[in-house]
Amino acid sequence: MTKEQFILELQRIGAIKFGSFTLKSGLVSPFYFDLRDMISYPELLDGVSDLLVEKIKDMEFDVLTGIPYTALPIASLVAFKLKKSLVYMRKEEKSYGTGKNIIGKFKEGEKCLVIDDLITTGTSKIETAESYEKEGVIIKDFVVVIDRSANGTEELAKQGYKLHSMINLNEILELLQNKNLISDEKVKEVNDFTASISKPKQEEKEISNPLTKKLLAKIKEKRSNLVLSLDVTSQKEFFEILDEVGPEIVMLKTHVDILDDYDENFVSKLQEYARKYDFLIFEDRKFADIGNTVRKQFRSGIYKIADWAEYVTVHMVAGESILKGLFDGIEGRSSFILARMSSKGNLINETYSRKCFEIARRNPMLVSGFIGHGKNVEDIKCYKAKFPSGMLLLMPGVKLEKGSDSMGQQYITVEEAVQGGADCIIVGRGIYGNENPGEIAKIYRERAWKEYEKRN
Ligand code: 5BU
């Protein structure tokens, strides 16, 4: 069956309709596609699965799924024809018995290709991807039979997914128009409707946040994307190590509240070092309270972090207003959101990460990027692909060798981190825990920089 024959068959069985239809959203659409009844026409199912096989046979994936209900029988046939295994997701989360939400055999880290019948806005595809990602399955590609959206491709791309459409709306309109099965007026009506519901295209914006630009410029200028996390508890040790490691790093990350002997001279000395060795200052305070409280935590108290830290970290659990509390009325400061953590068993899931990205997208002047981690290069790439454009990835939990500590920290290698997309690696004990922090920092720097240059 050719694509044209398939479209004409769909029209014949009433799966493509023109008229006036109220959509789930309440909008009234001049056309409606409903592929549910296709299961009653074996030759059509055979035809569509052949066309899909042709479309996906060279794509890379381990398992195949269809989004229930309509696409599941279609995906079953495609899987059968390609001799690939099929999985599917329950519609209701299961909390009893095995608690398994994905039916079928799969291994964590396997790539799943998702088939669906239609795409309108892309929202349900993203939700599907998230529920698979939660179970450790990697989703990158969606294949749809009909793309009735105006910009589904862009919407999915923003979240890091690729859309492959077998047929788009224009092809259907053109064919039916040529066969005199639809009037010119109707075609216009459909096109006008589609244009009216599509979101305006967002241009790839240049980076506007001056602190993001500053970090990027410093990375380039100093040829280093190494951040030292200097988690020692005495000032003596702090500055001794900094004297050795300062020349190697683009930024210093502090936990100022772990110093036993913090005093009023600390900050001026730190700033002097930052000037001398040309690095930026980042306090990993992890603000996480209501706006009014974080505002005071940032500006007041013993440490007065806002006076000296150019970057801080933020947990988004309290919601977007935390950014207002932190930065309102302050210039020259920016944040990194914890959209993933490196510690074992942390409670952050894909939905939470996505919400962090949405908040950052709305606040580009207050957010420079995200802290993140991942199991491997692929996993990190998936994570970074979802970032709003121009946002950076800083990655802790990095050492020369993979491993873990006894308190839940998980390490991946420098190469994995940077290949996956880390713009900076954050290293603590790997450097300050070494007998020769200066020498080892040089090794970290060189290894991270080599991968960074390769990647860019
Ligand atoms: P390490 O010694 O390289 O394990 O130190 C890592 C540093 O990064 C340490 O200061 C942590 O507080 C910080 N960190 C992290 O390890 N993992 C995270 O997810 C975040 C911060 Br957020």
Image (spheres, helix red, strand yellow):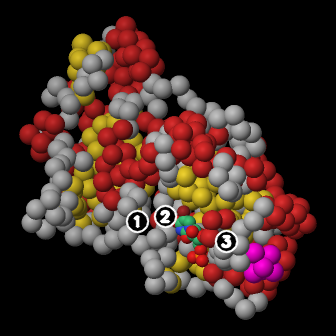
- Which residue does the numbered mark 1 point to in the structure image? 346
Query: Which numbered disc, 3 or 1, marks the residue that appears first in the sequence?
Result: 3
Q: Which residue is located at x 40 percent, y 65 percent?
A: 346
Residue 325 in picture, x, y percent from top left: 58, 39
Segment colored magenta? 235-241
Q: Nearer the viewer, mark 3 or mark 2?
A: 3
10 is higher (above) or lower (below) than 88:
above
The amino acid type, in three-letter code, at marker 2 is Met
The residue labelled by disc 2 is: 341
Mark before the other along the chain sequence, 2 or 1: 2
Secondary element at tag 2: loop
Callout 3 crowding tier (Cα within 10 Å): few <14, some 14–19, many ≥20: some
Left or right, 455 with reference to 18: right
Q: Please name the residue that numbered disc 3 is placed on.
A: 259
Q: Residue furthest bottom?
A: 435
Is 421 in front, or is 238? 238
The residue under the point 35% across, 52% down is 130
Using the image, determine if residue 19 lies above or below residue 356: above
Q: CA distance from mark 2 to mark 1?
A: 7 Å
Which quadrant of the picture is home to ligand 1?
A: bottom right
Kindly identify the amino acid type of the residue bearing the numbered disc 3.
Leu
Answer yes or no: do the residues labelled 3 and 2 have beta carbons within 8 Å? no
Name the secondary structure under disc 1.
loop
| 68 on left or right of 310 | left
